[in-house]
Image (spheres, grey):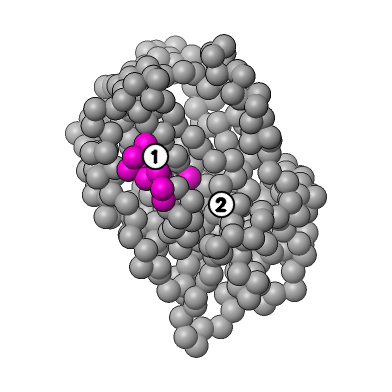
Amino acid sequence: MKLVDTGGYGVMMGMGKVEMGRGVCREVMLKIQSIQVKKDFLPLELGSIDIILGMKWLQTLGETKVNWGTLRMELVKDGRKRVIQGYTGLSKAGVSLKSIIKTIQEGEDYLVELYRLEGVSVEEGGDIPLSMQPLIQEFKEVFQPPLGLPPPREQEHAIILREGMSPVSIRPYRYPQFQKDEIEKLIRKMLEAGIIRPSTSLFSSPVLLVKKKDGSWHFCVDYRALNKETIPDTFTIPLIDELLDELSGTVIFDKNDLKSGYHQIQMKKEDVSKIAFRTHEGHYKFLVMPFGLTNAPATFQALMNKIFKPYLRRFVLVFFDGILVYSRTEEEH
């Protein structure tokens, strides 16, 4: 394969990570079982994956029939029916909670598959029961989006770096034009909300955009380089099995996810400069605790434990920014 130099570029992968590359391999011939593909390929570091055929290729296939259970794809190519059969021998590997916690603390990416407990659920955005509407109206201020800095709390987030390390500074990634527009829009919103401000810090981490289910974008900062130089917190993360044991005999549950939970904790003033980030058009710093820091989950869990201490294991369970209120009867609830 001949590599044609096209200059450097960045490609955002499925998990939101940006892989940097340079050049393109023109008109590479690839055979997939009975189908031949002739396409341009970008050389990128894909780990154990050899090749990714993206949406541009899938769009050329026209109407297809896919069975995800058997990993079988049927399509018509050159007037003939073709079949691509995936390998079904791949199996899912279990992972312990201890391994997941270690992965989080090291700032690495991970994929976890969770199974829902059986029970009655209400679709998001569904009708609110009449019996609940007066209560929601009484405390409507709780459901308003938070604006400005959170009030001072007992818990602030601190970043303790390894001794002798120099400021972490990573150059910004390259973004397509539509992502630059979105980044500028999100920056304006955060400036107006008062949770970020311009920075002159020697520290700098790059920005990533991750698409949400509703099509909007989640603003993320890639703090992996900073996390490698951060001393991990010794806070003990609660075990899911122990939390589930507390629910024995209970039948009614309310699950609450805090709105912008991490942003409700201020950073220690002396550590604000360490979480500075740079975009294509400016250098900024968070005044609140952002997502992606090594010890952020432990800081948030510690605050939740302090707030709900009188109620923990009586009728409240807390796991990071998820709060579960449980009861044995409707009257008790």
32 sits to left or right of 307: left
Q: Secondary structure at mark 1?
A: strand
Q: Indicate yes or no whether the magenta region holds residue 320.
A: yes
The residue that disc 1 covers is 316
Dividing the picture into quadrants, the one containing residue 134 is top right
Q: Where does the magenta region start and end?
A: 309-321
Q: What residue is drawn where x is 59% and y is 45%?
A: 260
- Using a 10 Å C-alpha cutoff, classify the residue at mark 1 as few (fewer than 14 neighbours), some (14 to 19) or many (20 or more): some
Dividing the picture into quadrants, the one containing residue 279 is bottom right
Which quadrant does the C terminus fall into? top left
**Residue 49, relative to residue 125: is it above or below?**
below
Q: Position of residue 69 (x, y in %)?
A: 29, 21
Q: Amino acid at mark 2?
A: Tyr
The residue sitting at the left extreme is: 89
Q: What residue is drawn where x is 34% and y is 40%?
A: 314
Pair 2/1: label in front: 1
The residue that disc 2 covers is 262
**Residue 189, relative to residue 53: is it above or below?**
below
Please state which of residues 123 and 102 is positioned toward the viewer in this rendering: 123
**Residue 236, relative to residue 158: is it above or below?**
above
